[in-house]
Image (tube, rainbow, N blue to C red):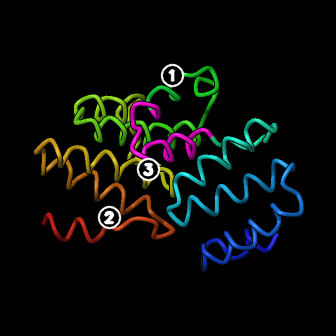
């Protein structure tokens, strides 16, 4: 699908392609998912939420829960993101999908001023600083950011260093944060 090919370079064009596909095949879960993901990358949380929920109802086999929870945060409902994390579907998530939901729910806790709970969520299960990859980098980054919010600058610096080491794709600005804190 053309939308997927353009997502990284031009999310607006990807969204336009996905919306065009929706006019022709709006009852296909994969099409609705593509619209939702493109809208998510454009920051259109309400549209992304509606489309991702529709794809989920239609039986999409993708793990959409972390994106749906993040959209709830985006539209100003962090408590709903937390509620989604308590669902049976969330309990079945594993690996990177479970970590992505952890990141989102920790962000929701922080949105509500519950920084200690966010930190506890991010640190359980314990973080492995030897991990690499985009999800590990984002998890370490979120942990570092939460530590910094709690005034634990030296611990935060260490986890920004771990985030930078894990970030083989350059998905975060961890290196810049290290420079700021050093």
Whether residue 133 is visible to the viewer of this picture, yes or no, is no
Secondary structure, mark 3, is helix
**Res 109 quadrant in image:** top left
The residue located at (25%, 44%) in the rendering is 146
Q: Earlier in the sequence, mark 3 or mark 1?
A: 3
Pointer 1 residue: 86
Give the crowd class for mark 1: few <14, some 14-19, many >=20 residues within 10 Å: few
Which residue range is magenta in the image?
A: 65-81
Secondary structure, mark 2, is helix
Q: Residue furthest front?
A: 23
Label for residue 74? Answer: 3
Real-space Cα distance between discs 3 and 1?
A: 19 Å
Q: Nearer the viewer, residue 165 or 93?
A: 93
**Res 112 quadrant in image:** top left
Question: In the image, is residue 12 above or below residue 35?
Answer: below
Question: In the image, is residue 65 above or below residue 167?
Answer: above
Pointer 2 residue: 174
């Amino acid at each position: 699908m053309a939308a997927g090919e353009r997502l990284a370079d031009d999310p607006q064009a990807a969204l336009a392609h996905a919306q065009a596909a929706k006019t022709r095949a709006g009852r296909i879960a994969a099409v609705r998912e593509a619209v939702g993901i493109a809208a998510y990358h454009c920051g259109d949380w309400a549209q992304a939420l509606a489309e991702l929920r529709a794809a989920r109802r239609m039986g999409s086999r993708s793990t959409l829960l972390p994106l749906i929870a993040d959209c709830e945060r985006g539209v100003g409902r962090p408590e709903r993101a937390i509620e989604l994390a308590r669902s049976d579907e969330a309990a079945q998530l594993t690996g990177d999908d479970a970590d992505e939901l952890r990141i989102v729910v920790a962000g929701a806790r922080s949105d509500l001023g519950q920084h200690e709970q966010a930190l506890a969520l991010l640190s359980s299960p314990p973080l492995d600083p030897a991990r690499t990859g985009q999800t590990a980098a984002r998890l370490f980054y979120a942990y570092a950011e939460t530590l910094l919010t709690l005034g634990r600058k030296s611990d935060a610096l260490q986890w920004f260093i771990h985030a930078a080491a894990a970030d083989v794709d350059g998905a975060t600005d961890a290196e810049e944060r290290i420079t700021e804190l050093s």
